[in-house]
Image (spheres, helix red, strand yellow):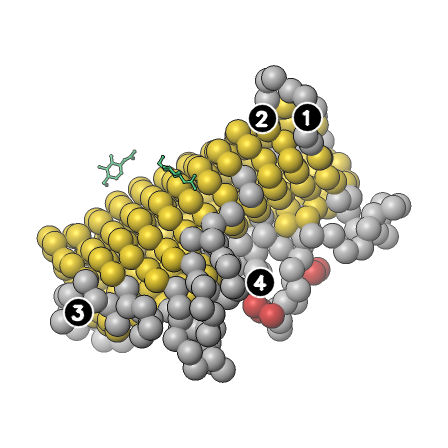
């Protein structure tokens, strides 16, 4: 299928398999698709979860250099923040296997830019995801219950997480992504629901975060859940931060005002290697683990972060680390800020 250059008003679309294809199905988007509202296009349903969805397809290439414009601005309710309704995802890949998504732009989605749910072996390369810094819940790429996801050479400027990986994200590789403004690269929240699947095997390499709220974050909620997921085997390596508020943060008390039980999610084998740049806040490294299941084997190797937000510029650019319930922290090489303990 080829969408030629030009501008096209398009209501919600679902492409559903399974398909009888030996070769990948190719969708080439060269033009600009504009998300239509019911008053603009007949038979456009009001409430949908996704604008464009690919479902249950084995072998799919979505390529072409085109743009998907969600025209979200009129739908963003800035008052609701995280409590806001789930607005349509610009492009959702669900139960898609063996896929390549390459050279596409997503602009101003109503909800997330791209969703990856229940996928296996999907590569997302050379994407450009753009929305204003203050647009609520416009995650760049949101991954759940998927294995083998590779993201590379991608630029993300948005209002929420550049990349979010929640339950069941396994064997994820993120390379050469430029993120910011936005909320950074996040694992979680985890621990919200019973029977969540684990997050395991995440590698984030050669990425740059600029003017983001968080840099590299793992967040889990407090809660009484007995059967919780775990997050393990995570490597963050060769990352550059520019003016990031919380460059390294493990937060196991995320959004937990009214909940007294500590987070049941166990975090282990997390490696921060060669992380350098600048922090906008004085606490550049925060490791806030769960009292119930303390973090295990968190390694820091060559961390060089300077504090740029200091009120008196003549003070040295020193920042600090805070740690709680983090047994088995280990440090090698340079540590700026200095290690906890
Ligand atoms: C992730 O990759 C490893 C190594 O290739 C493999 O053993 C494991 O089964 C994969 N995880 C899942 C959930 O498929
Ligand atoms: C990743 O970053 C490291 C350290 O800056 C650099 O040596 C390496 O060449 C980079 N790799 C790629 C593929 O750009």
* Mark 4 vs 3: CB contact within 8 A: no
Query: Which comes before the other along the chain, label 1 or label 3?
Result: 1
Image quadrant in which the N terminus is located: top right
The residue under label 3 is: 340
Residue 232 percent location from the top left of the image: 33, 53
Residue 308, above or below 71 = below
At numbered mark 2, what does the secondary structure look like: helix, strand or loop? strand
Residue at 58%, 26% (x, y): give it. 59
Image quadrant in which the C terminus is located: bottom left
Residue at 35%, 45% (x, y): give it. 201
Instruction: Give me the disc on residue 59.
Output: 2
Q: Nearer the viewer, mark 1 or mark 3?
A: 1
Task: Give the number of callouts.
Answer: 4
* Mark 1 vs 3: CB contact within 8 A: no
Q: Can you tell me which quadrant of the image ligand 1 is in?
A: top left
- Using the image as rendered, state which of residue 41 and residue 251 is in the foreground: 251
Disc 2 from disc 3: Cα separation: 48 Å
The residue under label 1 is: 19
The residue under label 4 is: 136
Q: Is residue 306 left or right of residue 290?
A: left
């Amino acid at each position: 299928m080829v969408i030629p250059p030009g501008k096209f008003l398009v209501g919600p679309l679902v492409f559903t398999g399974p398909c009888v294809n030996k070769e990948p199905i190719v969708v080439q988007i060269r033009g600009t698709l504009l998300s239509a509202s019911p008053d603009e296009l007949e038979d456009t349903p009001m409430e949908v979860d996704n604008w464009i969805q690919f479902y249950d397809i084995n072998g799919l290439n979505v390529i072409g250099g085109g743009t998907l414009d969600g025209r979200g601005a009129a739908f963003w309710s800035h008052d609701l923040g995280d409590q806001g309704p789930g607005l349509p995802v610009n492009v959702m890949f669900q139960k898609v296997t063996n896929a390549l998504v390459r050279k596409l732009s997503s602009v101003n989605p109503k909800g997330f830019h791209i969703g990856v749910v229940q996928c296996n072996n999907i590569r997302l390369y050379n994407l450009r995801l753009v929305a204003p810094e203050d647009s609520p819940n416009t995650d760049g790429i949101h991954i759940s219950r998927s294995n083998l996801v590779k993201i590379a050479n991608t630029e993300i400027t948005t209002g929420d997480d550049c990349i979010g990986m929640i339950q069941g994200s396994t064997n994820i590789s993120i390379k050469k992504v430029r993120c910011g403004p936005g909320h950074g690269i996040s694992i979680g929240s985890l621990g919200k629901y019973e029977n969540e699947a684990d997050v395991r095997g995440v590698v984030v390499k050669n990425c740059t975060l600029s003017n983001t709220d968080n840099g590299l974050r793992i967040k889990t909620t407090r809660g009484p859940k007995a059967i919780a997921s775990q997050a393990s085997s995570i490597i963050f390596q060769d990352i550059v931060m520019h003016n990031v508020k919380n460059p390294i943060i493990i937060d196991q008390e995320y959004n937990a005002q009214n909940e007294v039980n500590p987070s049941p999610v166990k975090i282990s084998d997390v490696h921060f290697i060669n992380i350098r740049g600048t922090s906008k806040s004085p606490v550049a490294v925060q490791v806030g683990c769960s009292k119930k299941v303390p973090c295990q084997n968190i390694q820091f190797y060559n961390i060089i972060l300077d504090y740029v937000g200091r009120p008196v510029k003549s003070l040295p650019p020193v920042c600090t680390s805070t740690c709680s319930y983090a047994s088995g922290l280990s440090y090698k090489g340079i540590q700026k800020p200095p290690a906890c303990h």
